[in-house]
Image (cartoon, helix red, strand yellow):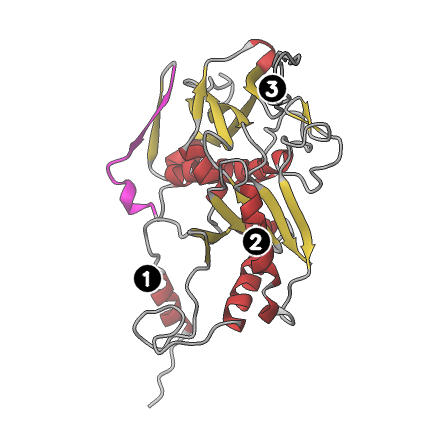
Amino acid sequence: MTFSLSASQIQNFMAASIEFHMRGEVAKQSIQDKHLLKMLEAGSKPFPGGKDKKITYRVKGDYVGAEEGYEGDDQVSYYNPSEIREASIIWYERHIGLTCTGTELKMAGITVTESDVKYTMKDQKQAAATRLANIWDDKMEDMTESRSRSRERMFWADGSASTKDVPGVKYWIVDNPTVPLVVAGLDQGANTWWRNRARLGIVANLANAASQVLVDTLQFEYRQLTRYGDKPTTLLCGSAFIEQLERELRARGQYTQTGWSDTGTLDVSMGDVNFKGMRAQYEPHLDDIGESKRGYWLNIGANGLCQMHMDGELDKSHAPARDPKEYVIYMARTSTLAMKCRRRNHMGVYSIA
């Protein structure tokens, strides 16, 4: 049986009903892991300030003395060590701020109370009746995630994009460590101990996966990275770099009864690839900048890359006074940051062709 509705009936239904809208937190669609940022911020160290925005520290790599043989009244020599060098970095000020109008918040059922130092947000009693998502919470989340994204980009870059950016990984870990280049005040060309490792364009691909070219190269490189008594702490990679490691592992292995992932079922997937106990972690940002074929062996910590922050100036919140002619709210966060590296010779950059 078929029913037909008149125009007046349809109009009546439209006036008497509403769409169903789900409430709750906004579903974020594009948030990626930021392993480098997470590790650097977890180990951030404070500093008190400093003249000319400079932080200095001492490094040493040359030992020029030598033991010598003697007999009877042979003359012997003496030397006076003077090989300490000063490395220096600069601290930078960073800002992110957002703005919104009081009208926007009122429409979402939020009342704003102003004071000299902050804004206080209070929900109206029946705010839930008109709200599908908390607009203020979303704005604050947006600022936090935007800050994290921009800082992740900065910490991977070399600082050349802006004189106000903190030089990051690519400042310390360069593609050609043998050329004359001043890094933190020291010339890597003249000081072999002030160099990272680099092997780019490694000829490793699907066709030669069984030859384990990439695995063999990393095995050799890891030995060199541990040559001076320290070692990398993390391996951050683009997707193609990890894929080649997986290909080489599969090409020289065989499926077990439980599969590669050892879940108790015949699973054709593969667990995470590890090297010397370090997981080859996928760093999405490398894909974003067209470097999916790269991997970075880094030391994050006191002897390697370390974020520095001025004491009391890390993600400091601000509520700037609004223009009295406009009911516009301003919120900001600032940080005073630097990145220090005490040693470069136990870190490296690698890529496949």
Q: Which mark is residue 56?
A: none
Q: Is residue 204 above or below residue 307?
A: below
Compute the Cα span from label 2 to label 3: 31 Å
Q: Is residue 233 above or below residue 86?
A: below
Residue 303 counted in the magenta span: no
Helix, strand or loop status at disc 3? strand
Residue found farthest to the front: 72
Residue found farthest to the left: 125
Taking the spot 49% from the left edge, 52% from the top edge, the residue there is 30
Residue at mark 3: 88
Amino acid, disc 2 = Leu
Residue 127 counted in the magenta span: yes
Compute the Cα span from label 3 to label 1: 68 Å
Residue at mark 2: 218
* x, y percent for residue 142: 46, 40
Amino acid, disc 1 = Ser
Query: In the rendered structure, are the residues bearing label 2 and label 1 in contact, judged by CB atoms less than 8 Å apart?
Result: no
Amino acid, disc 3 = Ser
Taking the spot 54% from the left edge, 47% from the top edge, the residue there is 223
Nearer to us: label 2 or label 1: 2
- Quadrant containing the C terminus in the rendered view: bottom right
> Which mark sits nearer the N-terminus, 2 or 1?
1
Q: Is residue 2 above or below residue 352?
A: below
Left or right of residue 108, residue 225 in this image: right
* x, y percent for residue 114: 37, 20
Specify the segment rendered in magenta.
Answer: 117-131
Residue at mark 1: 17
Nearer to us: label 3 or label 1: 3
Q: Looking at this view, is 305 or 146 the one in front?
A: 305
Nearer to us: label 2 or label 3: 2
